[in-house]
Every structure is written in C-alpha cells, then in structure tokens.
Image (cartoon, rainbow, N blue to C red):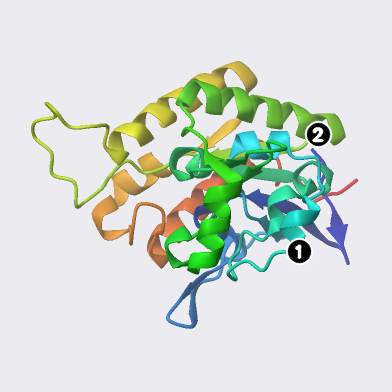
Amino acid sequence: MALMQVNSMPRMTILAAGNGDVRDCLHALHENGSVTWNGINSVLRARSSDWSARVIHRTMTRSDAVLAHDGVAPAALLDRTFPKDPFSARSQFANDLFETPADVVVLSIQPDVMNALCRHRADGHLLYAYDLGNWPDEARNWLTQCYGPVPMLGPEESMANIARIVSRIGERKPAHILVFNMSATMPWERVRCYRGLSETLSERIRRFNLALIDLSRSMGISIVDVDAVLAGAGAAGLKIDPVTLSAQGCRLVATEVVDILEQLGALDGGSAG
C-alpha cells in the first residue's frame, strides 16, 4: 500500500482512535509535566527508517456510540457547561473516524471493556459521563434526570460493532487496520478462589482478547498484542494502572506496531503514490 510522501521523505498518517493506551504509545507519554516517551517516530528513527508518522489522536467513548452518532452533537449538550475533559460533547459525536484520510487506523478494545454509557430518556442518544464523581451536584442531578444507564458491552457485541466500524472505514479508502488488545495482568489481583466472586477485570479483558482473535481470523485485521508484549517483558513493572503503561511499556508496544507495519509491507520501498 503506497503511503504519502512529503519533501522526498515518505510519511504515513496514523489515525489513533482510542484513549490513553493508543495515545501514550503512538503519540507521546507525559509524566509529571515531562515527555517520557515520544511515540512511534522514536521507533522509526531508531531503525534508521526513512519513514515518519503523523499521528492524529481522537478519543473514543465506545464502539456502539461511534456507530450510533451522526456527527452532530445535540444542541442541548452544546448549551451545557461540562467539566473540562477529553470527552467534550463535540468530540463524542464527531464522525472523524470515518472522514479523516489515513494510511493506518488504530483502534482499541479498551473503551468497550471499561466504559459505561448512559442514554437520553427522550431522543435515545448515548453519552459518556467521564469522571462523573468529580462533576458538580447540579450537573449530576441533570444527568440523572435526563439519562438512564446503559449495560456494559459483552465481547460478542463489541466485536460485531468493531467489524462494522472496520467495514465503514474500508468504504472510504483502503487502510491498514490495527486493534490494540489489553494486558490482562493486574499485579494487585491475587484471587485464588472465584466462588461467589463476580467477574474480575482481568477475566473480562481475557474474554475480549479471545473474541478479538476470532475477529482477526474473519476480517484479516492485525492485533497489536499488548497482552503478549507486556507479559514477555514483565508486565508488573510496565503498567501504572489497568490502562496506562510506563514509558518502557509504551516503547515496547510502539515497536510492535512498527513490526506489524513492516510485516504488512506498509514501510516497503519508501515510495509513495
């Protein structure tokens, strides 16, 4: 697949649609006000590659919301003042995942594994109330009055949604599709008997990871196997929380992305069309 060339240096555009996991690994990781990992271009430079990457990051609430929204946020949401966060009303309803030209599109199962949505009681639109515990009382009361809870997604529903997203992306322009799975290692989980215990986060992640393998078989998309990459290098020392990786963890995952792109032939030749 021929990628873009700028000033005689080939450059790929990567649309990273996800949250901290894809942003930190591919764009940059900031810790305590400093950049501790400078993204996928660090891997490309280390390999003396002619290629560079332009990474466009967009947040993602959940796959069902991406498919349900038509690109226009309800006026009632735009008129409200939300706590400052990365999930503004406009970003939640944007259609840029399907409209932004990109050579590589990177998705993640993380939003479907971890995010809970709510549904508007009148018109049915979906909303992600990010960091709800820190909302002021007035905003939380408004949310309770106007919205009802939506069940968490299961692996089967999630994969069906991701398949539809991949198909819609392919209708616009052929692109390499990569999907991050999640590390199921939770150093703080020490469960030895599961009787009477509800599903743990590590169990839920494993179920989604297995479902993603089946989706890869059926659609030919590439899995960025975060779980295997971190397990092979000692996950306990590479994870800050269930989603956030250390700078070393980000480097390992970004290296895996470059390995996949090389295997797909995306970096062959350095020529562009």
Instruction: Please name whichever residue, 115 or 170, is drawn nearer the observer in this view of the structure.
Output: 115
Instruction: Please name whichever residue, 72 or 226, is drawn nearer the observer in this view of the structure.
Output: 72
Label 2 belongs to which residue? 174
Q: Residue at x 45, y 67 (%)?
A: 134
Q: Is residue 137 left or right of residue 105?
A: left
Label 1 Cα neighbours within 10 Å, binned few <14 / some 14-19 / many ≥20: few
Q: Residue at x 69, y 43 (%)?
A: 105
User: With respect to residue 140, does 83 lie above or below?
Assistant: below
Q: Tell me where residue 103 sits by quadrant.
A: top right
SS category of the residue bearing label 1: loop
User: In which quadrant of the rendered image does the N terminus lie?
Assistant: top right
Label 1 belongs to which residue? 79
Label 2 Cα neighbours within 10 Å, binned few <14 / some 14-19 / many ≥20: few
Point out residue 88 in the picture as x, y percentages from the top left corner: 67, 61
Q: Residue at x 37, y 41 (%)?
A: 227
Res. 268 visible in picture: no
Q: Is residue 15 left or right of residue 35?
A: right
